[in-house]
Amino acid sequence: YDLQVAAARILQAQSQATIAGSLPFPSVDGSIDASYNTTTGSDRPSPDSIFEPRAGFGVAWEVDFWGRFRRGTEAAQADLLAAEEARYAVMATLVAQVGQAYLNLRALDLTLEISRRTVDSRVQSLDLVKARLDGGVAGILEVRQAETLLYTATKAIPEVQRQIEQTENFINILLGQDPGPIKRGRPLEGQIAAPGLPP
C-alpha cells in the first residue's frame, strides 16, 4: 500500500510539473454569445427580430521578469524527482523487509527441525533411562529428569510453529497477498552470496 501511495504521488508530481511548465506560454481565451432583440415587445422571436451574434477572442501573456515561472517549473521538477526517489526508497524498504522476513522464516524452519531432532533424542534418552531402571542401574529420579527434558523439548515445538505462521503472514502482508504458507527455496545454509563477486 505504501508503494501504491508513492506511485500516486509520482503521478501527482508529474501533473504539477506539466502545469508549471506551461505557465510561461501565452494563454488564449475565446467566447461566443448570441441573442435575439425583439422589436414588438414579445419574449418570443418574431420574423422581425434581430439576431445578434457576438464573439470574443483574447490572448494573455505575462513576461517572466523575475523568474517566477522558471523557479516554479524547477520546483515542480524537483518535487517530481523527490516523489520518484521516495518511491525507490519505499521499494528498497519493501524488498529489504521481505528479504529479512524470509531469512527469519528459514531460520525458524531450521529451529523447528532442530527442536524435532531434540525431541527424538530425548525420547531415546528416556527409553534408555527406563531400561536402566528396569535393570536396576538407574533410579526413579533419573527417569523423572529425562521426562522433564522431553516435556521441555516437546513444549518448544508449538511455539516455533506459531512464530513460523506469524512470519508467513507478515511476508504475505508485505506482498499484498492473503495469509497462507510461503513457498520455500534454498535452506538457510544455502543463502550465501556466490563467491567471486566483485566488491
Image: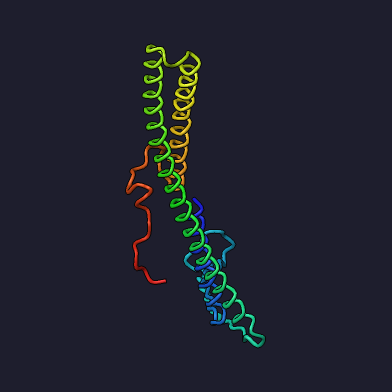
116 left or right of 65 in image = left
Name above or below for residue 95 compared with residue 197: above
Q: Looking at this rendering, what residue extends furthest in the right direction? A: 66
Name the residue at the front extreme. Answer: 137
Label count reads 0
Query: As rendered, which of 166 and 41 lies closer to the eye?
Result: 166
Q: Position of residue 30 (x, y in %)?
A: 52, 75
Work out whether residue 26 or residue 95 is closer to the camera in this orientation and state it.
95
Side (left or right) of 161 relative to 184:
right
- Up-down: is 180 above or below 12? above
Q: Is residue 178 above or below residue 153?
A: below
**In which quadrant will I find the C terminus?**
bottom left
The residue sitting at 46% across, 19% down in the picture is 147
What is the quadrant of residue 69 in the picture?
bottom right
Q: In this view, does 103 lie to the left or right of 66?
A: left
Q: Is residue 181 above or below residue 47?
A: above
Report x, y in % for residue 2.
51, 53
List x then y, in percent, for residue 68.
Answer: 64, 81
Q: Between residues 181 and 47, which one lies in front from this camera angle?
A: 181
Residue 56 location, quadrant: bottom right
At x 41% / y 26%, what residue is drawn?
Answer: 122
Question: What kind of colouring is applied to the model shown?
Answer: rainbow
Q: Nearer the viewer, residue 147 or 159?
A: 147
Residue that appears at 59% across and 62% down: 41
